[in-house]
DNA sequence: ACACGGGCTGAATCTAATA
DNA sequence: ATATTAGATTCAGCCCGTG
């Protein structure tokens, strides 16, 4: 069974009594209960300082349940920087000389975190992009869909060369090619998402276990100690336990602690033989028409026709096509010229190769074979 | 033909004489030659401050040709920050109030760049990940393969809402789903990579044209001015010219300028027909509901319902509609009957045509096509 | 039992024009 | 300047109810 320690208890327990526990308290002061150079890896999911204004509705007028918790509010960038510096310094002390730290964030905070890491003499090993299979759309159409978050992986300093990186395990898990710095995972939802009795999510930003599993499999060995200074609903602890690693969590809010404890206590550790990395699911990659233009397979200005040359359209530089006064995607315009509701532009539109007409789908196949290994 | 201007020339040329030129000189001082608020978009590929130590060999013992140029050397993070702050401030002055800036970098420098952007009150719109289809492997097997670079897209400040984002074009080009923040492109190689007479690459970090093409298609309109303060081999200029945009480049090294000039002069701009930007409803002329009544497309007294005939309203002669005791615009009444704050009356309300229900938006389309004939 | 469709939701810095 | 109004705007995935 895992336990919760108050700060006072954490400070007075027997040596190593803090291992596999959750310490209740503020991140920086709670870290004082831990010995110098005692943890192998830190995974930190700090507040992002989202700075949201007002409310946001979906096109169907439903309200977006924003992260507006008190713990994500900072008065200024300076205040956020001071906070970041303080917890990173405290983490630095408890990290073993060959330990590494992971920090996850979004564009709201990750640049400040990264700069502070460098200022404190941490040495960045990689930035790793978590690509979400199912991100929330941009509802107002004013930006690109924010479809990823960024993790920074850093060692204690530039000279620390002895950090753990399970290169061969990562490579084997990735179809025998090196694991890249961009990872594809779904967000945490469905059965994995912790809900309270009313069906409300326990924590607004619960991370997927698959993400933590790859982090832990990549940068720790069985028996290592993984510290999470912003423990939340305990994903780090649950995955660490399942993978035969030890954890330490720090968390201020009792509700989160309660949920995390129950969650972790129900985790069954895997046997030592099964501690292998799972790879993300692969699906046929979707190729946008734009990709053909960008890769030079089809030039702006090219005329497309249907198989029987009854309709024609011109390819524009922005990846749309135009036929008379109709313009839009290959699918929309294909539907429009035929007077239909829908059309598969990939098979409808053809390009001339010599005297022959070939469907643009043939070009997609070329791109797809290049992309297949990248998800 | 494009031209090169010395700094002195740039300062003394006729108004707008700096457009479609390369200014030779240091980034910050050369920017002084440009007027306040004169460029629409900035694309910056600043030195990455790579901090490489020693040499690196591939497994076959061949030497990796690292970026060890003088211009990439900085004494410290502080020196790099001061440099970053200086050129970003200079860029800020020449950027139009609704202009946006793109900066590309790697984990070596992008966190410092991002934090500085925020410190200078730029407002981050997205961070965009360039996923490389063919990145260099990690030869030592001590890290994840560094397979991406990061771009930050930011507006001049949080209040600048009028920046250009060709949402509909991006979506249409991406198979009718929103363009995401992770983009997949090959690195620049093969015929696109500029080589000198000896076959050596002209510039160590030449960016792929496809990447610039998407940046420019997303965030500029034809005729806009795109500034690149670290022009290098001129990818920004070449793509801008091809896509019917103007460019301004700043570059210190004569070798790069020579290569860029030759490259840009050989570019053939695309025709205006292929450069038409896909636009959505937002760009359509506004039509008042009243116009439908005045033009006889819908008669006062007509009964409107929603798609599922759950709500109904009657059209009044003054262009308002009434549902029970609620009366007002099609939008207000639509919202009211649903108990919502807002509603698009054009798509909510339907009229009967035979046994079919059609949205009144279809009638608006009729009005618009009539209006188009009269242009 | 299985298919299908509607409802709901996720770390979000999310409108533009007119009065 | 602020306030009001028009009206534009979503993707993937899970759950659940209905046929």
Image: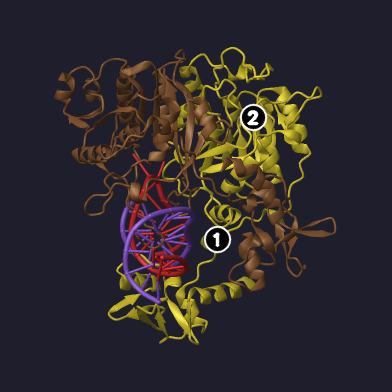
Chain colours: A brown, B yellow, C red, D purple
Residue for point 51% across, 36% down: A182
Residue B219 visible in the current orientation: yes
Residue B14 visible in the current orientation: no
Residue for point 29% across, 69% down: B339
Where A270 falls versus B65 (above or below)?
A: below
Q: Chain of mark 1?
A: B
Residue for point 34% across, 28% down: A245
Q: Nearer the viewer, mark 1 or mark 2?
A: 1
SS category of the residue bearing label 2: strand
Whether residue A215 sits left or right of residue B223 in the image: it is left
Disc sitting over residue B49 in the figure:
none
- Give the quarter of the image for residue A64: bottom left
Where B295 falls versus A203 (above or below)?
A: below
Residue at mark 2: B250
Say whether mark 2 and mark 1 are on the same chain: yes
- Give the quarter of the image for residue B227: top right
Residue at mark 1: B280
Where C7 falls versus B204 (above or below)?
A: below
Whether residue A59 sits left or right of residue B215 in the image: it is left
Q: Position of residue A153 (x, y in %)?
A: 44, 27
Q: Position of residue B178 (x, y in %)?
A: 52, 53
Q: Quarter holding the C terminus of chain A?
A: top right
CA separation, marks 1 and 2? 35 Å
Q: Earlier in the sequence, mark 1 or mark 2?
A: 2
Whether residue A51 sits left or right of residue A300 in the image: it is left
Of residues A271 and C19, the one nearer the viewer is A271
Seen as rendered, the residue at the extreme right is: A355
Q: Quarter holding the N terminus of chain A?
A: top left
SS category of the residue bearing label 1: loop
Q: Chain of mark 2?
A: B
């Amino acid at each position: 069974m895992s336990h919760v320690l108050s700060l006072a208890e954490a400070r007075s327990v027997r040596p190593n009594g803090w291992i596999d526990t959750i310490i209740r308290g503020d991140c920086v002061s709670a870290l004082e209960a831990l010995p110098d150079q005692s943890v192998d890896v830190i995974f930190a999911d700090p507040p992002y300082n989202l700075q949201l204004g007002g409310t946001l509705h979906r096109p169907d007028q439903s309200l977006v349940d924003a992260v507006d918790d008190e713990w994500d509010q900072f008065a200024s960038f300076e205040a956020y920087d001071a906070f970041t510096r303080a917890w990173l310094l405290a983490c630095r002390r408890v990290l073993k000389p060959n330990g590494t730290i992971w920090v996850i964030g979004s564009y709201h905070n990750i640049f400040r975190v990264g700069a502070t890491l460098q200022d404190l003499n941490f040495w960045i090993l990689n930035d790793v992009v978590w690509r979400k299979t199912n991100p929330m759309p941009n509802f107002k159409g004013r930006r690109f869909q924010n479809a990823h978050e960024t993790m920074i992986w850093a060692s204690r300093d530039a000279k620390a060369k002895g950090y753990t990186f399970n290169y061969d395990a990562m490579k084997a898990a990735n179809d025998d090619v090196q694991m890249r710095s961009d990872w594809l995972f779904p967000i945490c939802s469905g059965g994995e998402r912790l809900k309270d009795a009313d069906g409300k999510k326990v924590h607004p930003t619960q991370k997927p276990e698959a993400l933590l599993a790859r982090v832990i499999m990549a940068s720790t060995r069985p028996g290592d100690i993984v510290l999470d200074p912003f423990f939340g609903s305990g994903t780090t602890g649950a995955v660490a336990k399942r993978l035969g690693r030890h954890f330490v969590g720090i968390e201020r809010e009792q509700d989160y602690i309660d949920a995390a404890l129950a969650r972790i206590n129900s985790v069954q550790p895997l046997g030592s033989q099964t501690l292998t990395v799972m790879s993300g699911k692969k699906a046929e990659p979707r190729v946008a028409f734009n990709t053909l233009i960008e890769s030079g397979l089809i030039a702006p200005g090219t005329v497309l026709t249907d198989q029987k040359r009854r309709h024609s359209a011109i390819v524009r530089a922005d990846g749309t096509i135009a036929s008379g006064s109709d313009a839009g995607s290959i699918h929309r315009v294909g539907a429009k010229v035929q007077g239909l509701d829908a059309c598969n532009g990939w098979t409808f539109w053809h390009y001339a190769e010599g005297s022959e007409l070939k469907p643009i789908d043939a070009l997609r196949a070329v791109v797809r074979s290049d992309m297949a290994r990248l998800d």
